[in-house]
Image (cartoon, rainbow, N blue to C red):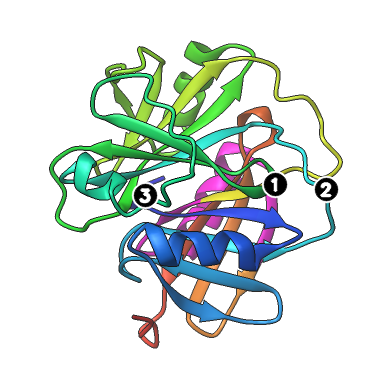
């Protein structure tokens, strides 16, 4: 397992346009692609993105706590938010806002080549340390705890961190999947077979080829390969 970067985080949403509207108006993103099934948003198609899949509501939070974006100047980024939005600032250099359907997005101040790239995803886990160890078998690298103090793993400079808690077994989860970019999805299919890791799905799309594996806490992890035809902006 050799993921290169954290490519995107995908949600199930009953009103994807509401979330897409907020992030494009206030969080430096644009609509990269929109189909009948999903809306893909990001500040750069070749960096961290959010995929908003259309689904029936209401959605349940399940394993997903929040997704945080990286900015070089937090105060400048906060100035782009609506004046009436409630901002949670648990630590220096971090701020979080709650959107529709339980979507919680964060801003983290750190050095970054691309504004509003993915900084980290926070997930609930019954045993955060054990879950972090399991993710290393899926190609994520061990990492020291960040400002929150939570156990975490790293991929391409971004993180997945784990908070103590019960993700439950929601029938309509908010989180669709977490995706990492790889050179070859086919190699990861072969590796999953060898390791006995459950393959949830394989998707051959016009611009990508991907395998979905079932990770700890039933979180789906996508290993996505960009085809030579990948030309989204």
Is residue 77 shown in magenta?
Answer: no
Image x and y of residue 183, in percent: 35, 63
Residue 115 in the figure: left or right of residue 27: left
> Which mark lies nearer to you, 3 or 2?
2
Of badges 3 and 1, the one in the foreground is 1
Residue occupying image coordinates x 61% and y 36%: 215
User: Is 216 or 157 nearer to us in this picture?
Assistant: 157
Residue drawn at 31 percent across, 30 percent down: 94
- Residue 3: which disc? 3
- C-alpha distance separating marks 3 and 1: 30 Å
Q: In the rendered structure, which segment of residues is drawn in magenta?
A: 179-202
**Residue bearing mark 2:** 58
Rendered-image quadrant of the N terminus: top left
Q: Is residue 112 above or below residue 22?
A: above
- Residue contact at pointers 2 and 1, CB within 8 angstroms: yes
Q: Residue shown at 71%/33% (left/top)?
A: 62
Which corner quadrant of the image does residue 92 belong to?
top left
CA gap, disc 3 and disc 2: 32 Å
How far is mark 2 from mark 1, CA to CA?
7 Å
């Amino acid at each position: 397992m050799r993921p290169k970067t954290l490519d995107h985080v995908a949600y199930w949403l009953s009103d994807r346009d509401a979330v897409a509207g907020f992030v494009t108006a206030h969080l430096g993103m644009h609509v990269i692609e929109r189909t009948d099934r999903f809306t893909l948003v990001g500040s750069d198609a070749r960096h961290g993105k959010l995929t908003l899949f259309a689904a029936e509501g209401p959605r349940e939070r399940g394993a997903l706590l929040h997704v945080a974006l990286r900015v070089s100047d937090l105060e400048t980024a906060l100035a782009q938010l609506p004046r009436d939005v409630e901002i949670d600032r648990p630590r220096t250099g971090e701020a979080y806002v709650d959107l529709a359907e339980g979507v919680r997005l964060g801003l983290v101040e750190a050095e970054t080549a691309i504004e509003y790239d993915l900084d980290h995803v926070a997930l609930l886990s019954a045993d955060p340390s054990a879950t972090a160890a399991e993710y290393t078998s899926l190609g994520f690298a061990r990492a020291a705890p960040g400002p929150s103090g939570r156990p975490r793993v790293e991929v391409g400079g971004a993180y997945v961190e784990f908070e103590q808690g019960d993700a439950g077994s929601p029938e309509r989860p908010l989180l669709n999947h977490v995706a990492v970019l790889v050179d070859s999805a086919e190699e990861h299919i072969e590796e999953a077979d060898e390791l006995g890791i459950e393959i949830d799905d394989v998707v051959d799309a016009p611009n990508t080829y991907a395998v979905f594996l079932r990770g700890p806490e039933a979180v789906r992890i996508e290993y996505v390969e960009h085809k030579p035809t990948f030309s989204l902006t």
